[in-house]
Image: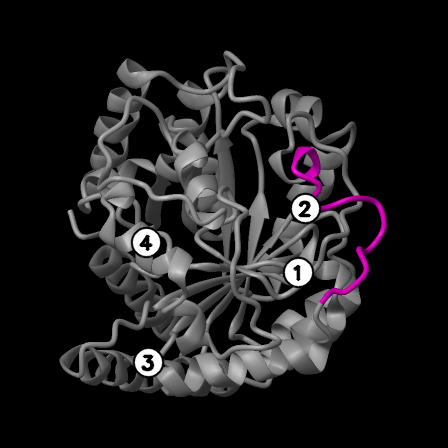
Amino acid sequence: MNIQAYMTRGVTKVVLNSLRVTARNKKEAAFMRSFAKASFAASVKRRASEKRGEHIPPFLIASITSRCNLHCAGCYSRANNACGDKEASGILTAEEWNRVFTEAEEIGVSFVLLAGGEPLMRRDVLEKAGGHPGILFPVFTNGTCMNDKFLDLFDSNRNLLPVISIEGGKEITDQRRGEGVYEKIKASMQKMQSRSIVFGASVTVTKENMRTVYSDEFVSFLSKMGCKAIIYVEYVPVDGETDSAPDEPEREWMQNRIRSLRRKRSEMVYIAFPGDEKSSGGCVAAGRVFFHINAGGGAEPCPFSPYSDCNVRDASIREALRSPLFYALNTKGLLKDDHAGGCTLFANKEQVEQIISGQSVSS
């Protein structure tokens, strides 16, 4: 499987389906048509760059804030000091993020995934993103801040696509995210459905919830709520030792299950990390398909490998993609490592740290 091709086809399918659904909504239909043209134009730019020997990934992950209003159990970002109750000092301003978005659009990046912390804490950045209709911005949110003003923002800027985090049913969602969160998530989905706002769901997969979140019942629930895509992200343990992370037999079961969903439940798009990476020839981070910019501007291979030797305050996206760290990861075989476990770079963090410190790493 080619994960890049599948994701691109999947988003195109969502766009086309939305066109049919919103045929009477001239504003929505106009946006979907313009984005389809912009997405094609971006792919032409990337192919032209490839012919010149320069690879431009179609996806960028941008953690636009380090602040979050929840304290989810086992949160990797909090354990890694990547987010907290208050905003960290030195984060990029809205204008600086706008410059990043502008450059991304110019070089052919089609999708910028907005994360955090909780991205709805940075409405100023979301408003800047809304001004770039040539890019689709999936906004990974916990869904608890979705008031009428944010619904208006998403309604007016259809290139901002909410992706709501959910762990399964009420009990397990509230157990991990806090009491009452599930009902807030459900209410947010209902409000978006009432306005025909396209949205997706993000699920952190553990041993405890994997059978539930891959079930027909759960998928049917999200489909009836109006969800158009489910992104399954395998739990990365904060200590590297927790028993909640799926093991190899469970990963094989999940891969078989998602293949079945894609065949039988084609009304939605299904993405699984890192499962889809293995069938795509290895880790897709460090610029292969995407890379990550943290709240302070550091260019990182991915959110689960928080190491950087380049900052977009001082360098362009093109320069960040050619950084010594990214070059080493792409040439020393770490991204294609067939290790026993989930995230490749998380499993090989000692080798990544050696690259950052200037030590040699054998390929």
Pick whichever of labels 3 and 1 is earlier in the sequence. Answer: 3
The residue indicated by pointer 2 is 82
Q: Nearer the viewer, mark 2 or mark 3?
A: 2
In whole angstroms, how far apart are the C-alphas of marks 4 and 2? 24 Å
The residue segment tinted magenta is 78-91
In whole angstroms, how far apart are the C-alphas of marks 2 and 3? 34 Å
Q: Which mark is residue 328?
A: 4
Residue 239: image location, x then y, percent: 58, 22
Is disc 3 placed on a helix, strand or loop?
helix
Q: Badges 2 and 1: C-beta atoms under 8 Å apart?
A: yes
Is disc 4 placed on a helix, strand or loop?
helix
Residue 143: image location, x then y, percent: 68, 49
The residue indicated by pointer 1 is 295
Identity, as a three-letter code, of the amino acid under mark 4: Ala
Is disc 1 placed on a helix, strand or loop?
loop
Does residue 66 appear left or right of residue 2 in this picture? right
In whole angstroms, how far apart are the C-alphas of marks 1 and 4? 24 Å
